[in-house]
Image (spheres, grey):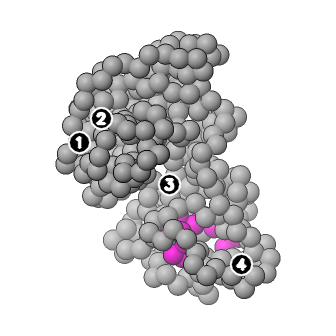
Amino acid sequence: MKAVSIKEITPAEKIVFTEIPIPEIKSGWVLVKVKAFGMNHSEQILRLAEIKEDYINKPIVPGIECAGEIVDPSDTNFKAGQKIIALMGGMGRSFNGSYAEYALLPAHHVFTIKSKLPWERLATVPETYFTAWGSLFECLHLQKEDTLLIRGATCALGYAAIQIAKALGCRVIATAHKETKLSLIRNADEAILDNGQLAGKIKATKALELVGAKSVRDTLRCMYKGGIVCHTGLLGGVYALDGFDPIKEIPNGVYLTGFFSNYPTQQIINEIFAFLDEHNLEPCFGECFDFEHIREACIALDSGKVNGKIVVKVK
């Protein structure tokens, strides 16, 4: 089968196809025909830096998510031909991921779906919509009466969160760090240019923090008493809060939580697709590439010029 397999630092321009064997089935795992997959910043990090780490099982096929069909269910409860999505659980790091025509995946991170959406739309759901869903409902307990601040909304996760929150009935305030990006979040009730200091200008009951540690202190000060901030993204490039004093820097009666997307369940996946169907929502993506053009897709990912999720469709 065709796959992208890497063992060293690999800029997008050096991406090439490799012919590798279709994986052999084993107990507790399923063989999936990959129909489409979304691309993620974490795969860029893998190619450009993380591949050097000892815990990466090299050579490795990148890709932390996919949509496809069961080819061989092995000894699991899946059935051949079932439509599925898969995400996380070590995909593309501990074992080969989705940048391939077939993927051998652990059954506990593969989930059946019932949807008439085309493959390229389905491929936008696994990591992006699961993360948005978990952040908004598991962590923020979002209700239709809420005013939701989405900080760093001009990314695939931000667009998904806007779509979900608006469908629920929330008032959404979304921010962008460039004036030229404001038109991309026009579906929010209010689109604001973020200069790094929003406290005193915005008040919200809930906040989805996608910029990360760089702005979370300021976001905490944008909350009404009883408000919740969910730290999910790291777009600001700052990964830790040096010298953070929770007693002094979390306002009284405001709550700080975070979402880690490594624990999907079939129940949550069912809830996501039921919500999409109930509200007649089409998952959004920025650009779709054919698998033959995976190099160009990786270049687009690295350049950051695509507004939204990049999807690759495998024939």
Sequence-wise, which precedes: disc 1 or disc 2?
2
Q: Nearer the viewer, mark 1 or mark 3?
A: 1
Q: CA distance from mark 1 to mark 3?
A: 26 Å
Residue corresponding to mark 1: 15
Q: Quadrant of the C terminus?
A: top left
Residue corresponding to mark 4: 246
Q: CA distance from mark 4 to mark 1?
A: 44 Å
Sequence-wise, which precedes: disc 4 or disc 2?
2
Sequence-wise, which precedes: disc 4 or disc 1?
1
| SS for callout 4 | helix
Tell whether label 2 touches label 1 (CB within 8 Å): yes
For mark 2, does the 10 Å Cα neighbourhood hold few (<14), some (14 to 19), or many (20 or more) residues? many
| SS for callout 3 | helix
- Whether residue 260 is visible, yes or no, is yes
Residue corresponding to mark 2: 4
Which percent across, then down, holds residue 48? 32, 54
Sequence-wise, which precedes: disc 4 or disc 3?
3
- Residue at x 54%, y 76% (from the top left corner): 215
The one nearer the camera, 193 or 104, is: 104
Q: Amino acid at mark 2?
A: Val
| SS for callout 1 | loop
Q: Report the magenta residues as a range.
A: 203-215
- Residue at x 47%, y 45% (from the top left corner): 55
Residue corresponding to mark 3: 157
For mark 4, does the 10 Å Cα neighbourhood hold few (<14), some (14 to 19), or many (20 or more) residues? few
Q: CA distance from mark 4 to mark 3?
A: 27 Å
**Residue furthest to the front:** 54
